[in-house]
Image (cartoon, helix red, strand yellow):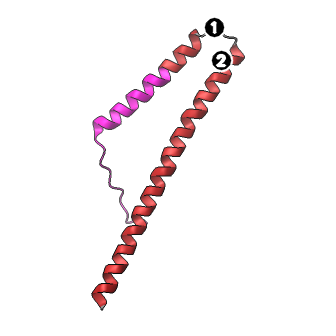
Amino acid sequence: MSNYIYDNHNSKSFYMMAWIAFSVSMFGMTAGLVNLDLDLPTKAFLAMTFLFSVSSCFTLAKVVRDKFEAEKFINKIETAKTEKFLNET
């Protein structure tokens, strides 16, 4: 799998937009928690659940991307084997 290169079709502006959106949402959530009229343990619980949600979203996105890449790689191998078999006959 070392010869496999992931074809990345995202532009730099797409990456920038994703990081800006992530930063704004983190800042907004933090500012909201700080200004919320609740006791500290409740704020800590809300912050913990928000961070867990964000980390699980990253994990899910990575798992979906990895599955897609693996299927794409396997399909390339199967296509190459089929072409080789057809060329030999």
Residue 79 against residue 84 in the figure, above or below:
above
Q: Is residue 5 magenta?
A: yes
The residue lying at 44 percent from left, 29 percent from top is 22
Of 30 and 38, the residue lying toward us: 38
Disc 2 crowd rating (10 Å Cα; few below 14, some 14-19, many 20+) is some
The C terminus: image quadrant: bottom left
Earlier in the chain: of badge 1 and badge 2, it is: 1
Tell me which corner region of the image, top left, top right, bottom left or bottom right, holds residue 79.
Answer: bottom left
List x then y, in percent, for residue 62: 49, 47
Kind of residue at badge 2? Lys
Residue farthest bottom in this picture: 89
The numbered disc on residue 37 is: 1
Tell me which corner region of the image, top left, top right, bottom left or bottom right, holds residue 2.
Answer: bottom left
Of 3 and 46, the residue lying toward us: 46
Disc 1 crowd rating (10 Å Cα; few below 14, some 14-19, many 20+) is few
The residue lying at 53 percent from left, 45 percent from top is 60
Extent of the magenta region: 1-27
The residue lying at 52 percent from left, 39 percent from top is 57
Of 86 and 13, the residue lying toward us: 86
The residue lying at 39 percent from left, 74 percent from top is 78
Kind of residue at badge 1? Asp
List x then y, in percent, for residue 86: 30, 85
List x then y, in percent, for residue 42: 69, 17
Callout 2 secondary element: helix
The residue where tag 2 is placed is 43
**65 to the left or right of 15:** right
Q: Is residue 88 magenta?
A: no
Callout 1 secondary element: loop
Residue 60 against residue 81 in the figure, above or below:
above
